[in-house]
Image: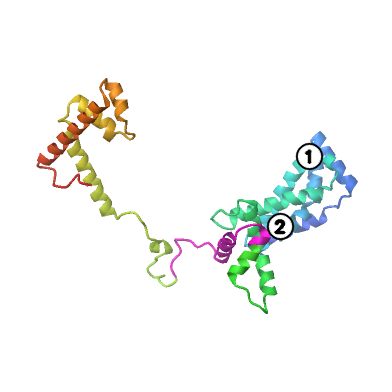
Amino acid sequence: MSIEAGRSTQLARAARTAPLLDRTQEYELALRWSREGDEKALHALIHAHMRLAIAIARRFRNYGLPMSDLVQEGHVGLMEAASRFETAREVRFSTYATWWIRAAVQDYVLRNWSIVRGGTSSGQKALFFNLRRLRARLERAAADAPTSREEMHRVIGARLGVSPVEVARMDARLGVPDLSLNAPLAFDEEDGAGRMDLLVADDPLPDEQAVREIDGERRRRWLLGALRGLNEREFRIIKARRLDEESETLETIGARLGISKERVRQIESRAIEKLRIALTRSPDVPMGAFSA
């Protein structure tokens, strides 16, 4: 027997030995815990309902997760129910706890079934946990008259309140398990190649990146040399209009320098022409370097 199976057996055995509580006993234990903080009463209440947590956890055993972990999450939900239970509601604790246990186990399944997080909305959760059952039921009903997959997705979506597109996406997710990108390919095991080697990157190649960085540094150096030929006012206007991340308007610059908008435009045009001439005459700058 594996360690996992042994843990599950021990939990089930302990739950079976727990005494069943009638309504009065259940109420008294909950009252002692909520009003007096009696931890012994809390332990007795939870211990008596562990079989409920195990029964709910078993409904999710087909998702490939350890049964002991599912039961543990059910225990967490049971603890949460005990901390929130109000005796004034006049409902059985088991009825109240069922919702919290199921919610805790479902959340655990959604977090761990796949590395891709899914089922965040109530509709997506209902789709995740009911798709297989509804699909199997529809397939059995359509044994004599086969139904297309698109029609099946439409029917399931209508029943669960989601779109057929969402049903199709979830159906595809449930049909394909997670695959490691580092796992070797079946047809190329000797070379040790994995699925990651087949991914196509949109980024440029390293040599192309190096060329771009070198060209960018050269253009920056050429431009700085040309900017040294501008006077202070020309440089301030070019910087505010062309070099800063957010370009300023002619009105804003004119107000700051105490000149008209038209005068700012004239100075900017003259400065651009000076830069063009300086770059054209420089022996280090190739023709067309700043054409883009």
Q: The residue under label 2 is which amino acid type?
A: Ala
Q: Quadrant of residue 58?
A: bottom right
Residue 84: image location, x then y, percent: 75, 41
| Residue name at image x 32 percent, y 26 percent | 252
Task: Classify residue 137 by image quadrant.
Answer: bottom right
Which residue, as the protein is rendered here, is positioned at the far top?
258
Q: Secondary structure at mark 2?
A: helix
Part of the protein shown in magenta: 157-185
Image position of 63 (left or right of 242): right
Question: Residue 224, percent across and down?
Answer: 19, 35
Q: Nearer the viewer, mark 2 or mark 1?
A: 2
Please tell me how many numbered marks the rendered image carries.
Answer: 2
Q: Is residue 134 above or below residue 202?
A: below
Judge the density around disc 1: few (<14), some (14-19), many (≥20) Cα neighbours within 10 Å: few
**Residue 14 shown in magenta:** no
Res. 147 image quadrant: bottom right
> Between disc 2 and disc 1, whose residue precedes?
1
In the image shown, does 292 or 96 lie closer to the viewer?
A: 292
Q: Secondary structure at mark 1?
A: helix
Does 214 appear above or below 154?
Answer: above
Residue 225 showing in the rendered view = no
Queried whether the magenta region covers residue 168, the answer comes back as yes
Q: Which residue is mark 2?
A: 57
Q: Which residue is mark 1?
A: 39
Crowding at mark 2 (Cα within 10 Å: few <14, some 14-19, many 20+): many
Residue found 26% across the figure and 31% down from its top: 239
Which one is nearer the viewer's eye here, 218 or 44?
218
